[in-house]
Amino acid sequence: EIVLTQSPGTLSLSPGERATLSCRASQSVSGNSLAWYQQKPGQAPRLLIYVASTRATGIPDRFSGSGSGTDFTLTISRLEPEDFAVYYCQQYGYSPPHWTFGQGTKVEVK
Amino acid sequence: QLQLQESGPGLVKPSETLSLTCTVSGASISSGNYFWGWIRQPPGKGLEWVGSIYYDGRTFYNPSLKSRVTISVDTSKNQFSLKMTSVTATDTAAYYCARTSGSGDYNYWGQGALVTVSS
């Protein structure tokens, strides 16, 4: 079973700054099947990025994903007030189908 | 527009069975190469995949929960359901139903249902 480790646990930044979030897998993620979600308090997670670098429908281009194999990154180029939230990475394994989430990174206002 | 809505008891006693239903509107559960899944989140903690059912009826479960979990589908009602037996306080969580895209990520989510396990 692949374990996803996100770092840092908390990121304290100001609006307008750049946020860089890391997700490291314990073994290579098949087909770069790695997604990123944003979750705000009291809300369901929202898909931001899938297959490591493709933005989901309606996601602003300040969000970008990169990486392959075991190391993946979510970058928010300039933080907007609505971007302060918790972010999770998730991988999809094929045989058998299974899903694993990272423990989350909280992006908070500095 | 695809919508998912969880329903079920918000309070379950320890050792009893948790039962939740996800009602789907805007698409048929039995069409398309999609997984319909359950993901849970204990208060203040992260997300955990519970299990999923494929459009053809095959089920897949988190190994850590497999002995206690059953996911089934009722195509006539366009619903899928979760049953978890022998619950304890550690099963207290918001339970989300969700659907994958063709890439395995969950791009449609219900609003979540909080289930508390307590006597």
Image (cartoon, coloured by chain):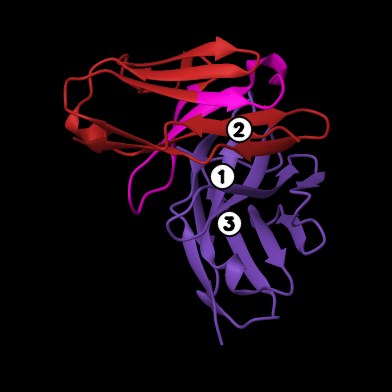
Chain colours: A red, B purple
Mark 1 → mark 3, Cα distance in angstroms: 9 Å
Q: Chain of mark 2?
A: A
Q: Nearer the viewer, mark 2 or mark 3?
A: 2
User: Do dots 2 and 1 share one subunit?
Assistant: no
Q: Nearer the viewer, mark 1 or mark 3?
A: 1
Residue type for callout 1 = Ala
Query: In the image, residue A78 lies at what x, y percent?
Result: 23, 18
Find disc 3 in the rendering and name its residue.
Answer: B22
Find disc 1 in the rendering and name its residue.
Answer: B98
Residue sitting nearer the eye, A95 or B28: A95
Question: Mark 2 and 1 residues: CB-CB less than 8 Å, in contact?
Answer: no
Tell me if residue A94 comes above or below residue B27 in the rendering.
Answer: above
Residue type for callout 3 = Cys
Residue at 59% across / 73% down in the picture? B89
Find disc 2 in the rendering and name its residue.
Answer: A4
> Magenta stretch?
A23-49
Outermost residue on the bottom side: it is B119
Tell me if residue A89 comes above or below residue A63 in the rendering.
Answer: below
In what element is the residue under mark 3?
A: strand
